[in-house]
Image (cartoon, rainbow, N blue to C red):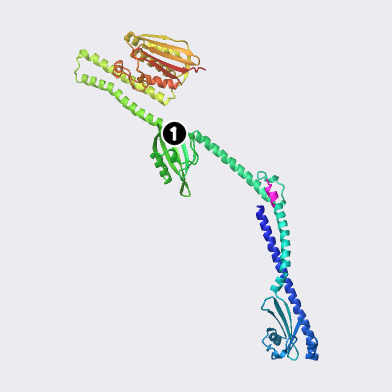
Amino acid sequence: MTNRIFRAIFLVAAAVMLAVSLLTMGMMYQFSAEETTEKLQRETEYIACGIETDGVRYLEKIKDAETRITWVDADGTVLYDSSADASEMENHGDREEIKEAMQSGEGNSKRISATLSGQTLYHAERLTDGTILRLSVETMSVVAVFLTMAFPLVLILAMMMAVSVFLAFRTAKNITSPINEIDLEHPEQAEVYEELTPLLRRIAVQNREIHRQMAELKRRKEEFDTITSNMQEGLLVMDGEGDILSYNAAAKTLLGVDAVTEGENIFSLNRSAAVRRSVEGALAGAHREERLEANGRICQIFANPVFREEEVAGMILVLLDATEKEEREQLRREFTANVSHELKTPLTSISGFAEIMKNGMVPPADMGKFAEKIYDEAQRLIALVQDIIKLSKLDEKDTSLCEEEVELDALVQEACERLQPAAERKRVTLSAETEPILFRGVKQVLSEMIYNLCDNAIRYNKEGGAVFVTLKQKADRISLTVRDTGIGIAKEEQGRIFERFYRVDASRSAENGGTGLGLSIVKHGAALHNGKIFIESEIGNGTSIEISLPYSIN
């Protein structure tokens, strides 16, 4: 900036000095020419008086080396010339100053020499007898004057230039130094000349506005980052080339990448056909939905274009984790198929027995047996429907399932008492070892869990076997264990026994009359109470299932 100011001041000063010099020289030349012309006029008037008195004799007496005197007759013939022989001179009637004097009484003219170094000024007057008296003097031309004054002018200009350079440098420094020392963060505190005060005030106002806008942008970015970082959905903001401008942590997880660099292209992260179709569709200005399978997860991609003045400036990709949704859909389909199958069996039996009785094909003596079978199948159907309803309530976290303080030991004793007849029929010994424990939970669900565990232990036990129920408090956990001496469960089957309608031995389950939903209710009940399930089993040596609940009594 200092150099530009210095150059500007220097050029302006140089131009001004040159203009002043030329103007001064022109004015001096003009003044000199006017002075010479006035001198010629006075001399012409004086000589004219002498000619009218003495004629040529007067002219011969006043010869002057500097001024040339020429006397011309009315027809242009030269009568006398102080510098040449008049008889040998050509007619002067066509001279400009002569013609002007003949017409108006006096005339002036100026003629430049061939070398441009000199010029001649002429002044002519008409005398009373009609003759013309002309005086002329040689002076320097403008070019000669300029050339004569060139050296001193250049010298003066050089000196003035040097002074101008010095003054320009000092002036530029004095102007720029205070400006360069201004603290742009606090311009109002700067000590500068008064002319800069409005500018500094404007800068201070602009600074405050910029700081306010930056704070607002920072706040909005923090809000955006907080919102997007806590989103379960993946979010990617990209420009028109597919380069990533912004993203959140969920996007990395769903795409299965460890890190995303801003400015990185989306296709360097994922080259699947679903991503490509989504990006191409959005860049074409259309909304696009695709299904992406990656890293064992299923995602739904929603691609939307971002327009700026009717042109696509970028796009937004939203990745929604649909794995759990699809798994639920799959479980729902399997559950529907299993329910249909499970309901079909007792309904078919009831329908078959009823049809036989309707057609009179059952002897009166066997009517009671057939009615008993219809009753048993109906009870099995009712139990199945009731278990399905219980599971549905647990799945939907039914608000009617209210928590309360429950005596777990009382629930264990109650379940054992209810199942004692079944144990006796199976010739299984059922025993319980408990201690008084209060637990805050859903009493109905806890009762179903204990009942189903004990019921399964009896159903899948050996004749003459035993079932042991233990309820104990361990530090901050409550342990409910049901151990039997039954048939056991194979290692590869243990992870699936809590699935709905899953049976280790379908034929044996049918004989025992189970619905296949008991352990599934236990699993959902434990999850409802933030509990964990542990199983130990060996084929032929029985099974032990432990439910560990957090001690949550207040």
Q: Which of 513 and 224 is in front in this view?
A: 224
Residue pointed to by mark 1: 256
Image coordinates of residue 236 in percent, x first then y, are 47, 39
Q: Nearer the viewer, residue 288 or 124?
A: 124
Residue 179 colored in magenta in the image: yes
Residue 25 visible from this viewpoint: yes
113 left or right of 522 in image: right
Question: How many C-alpha atoms fall within 10 Å of the one at disc 1: few (<14), some, or many (≥20)?
Answer: some
244 left or right of 110 in image: left
Q: Nearer the viewer, residue 405 or 429?
A: 429
Asked which quadrant contains residue 171, the reply is bottom right
Q: Which segment is the magenta one?
A: 175-182
Badge 1 amino acid: Gly
Image coordinates of residue 5 in percent, x first then y, are 67, 55
* Vertical side of 143 occupied by 372: above or below: above
* Vertical side of 404 occupied by 182: above or below: below
Residue 247 colored in magenta in the image: no
Image coordinates of residue 264 in percent, x first then y, are 48, 41
Identify the element where label 1 is drawn: loop
Image coordinates of residue 380 in percent, x first then y, are 31, 18
What type of secondary structure mainly makes up the magenta span?
helix
| Residue in the picture at 31% in, 27% down | 337
Asked which quadrant contains residue 81, the reply is bottom right
* Vertical side of 1 occupied by 186: above or below: above
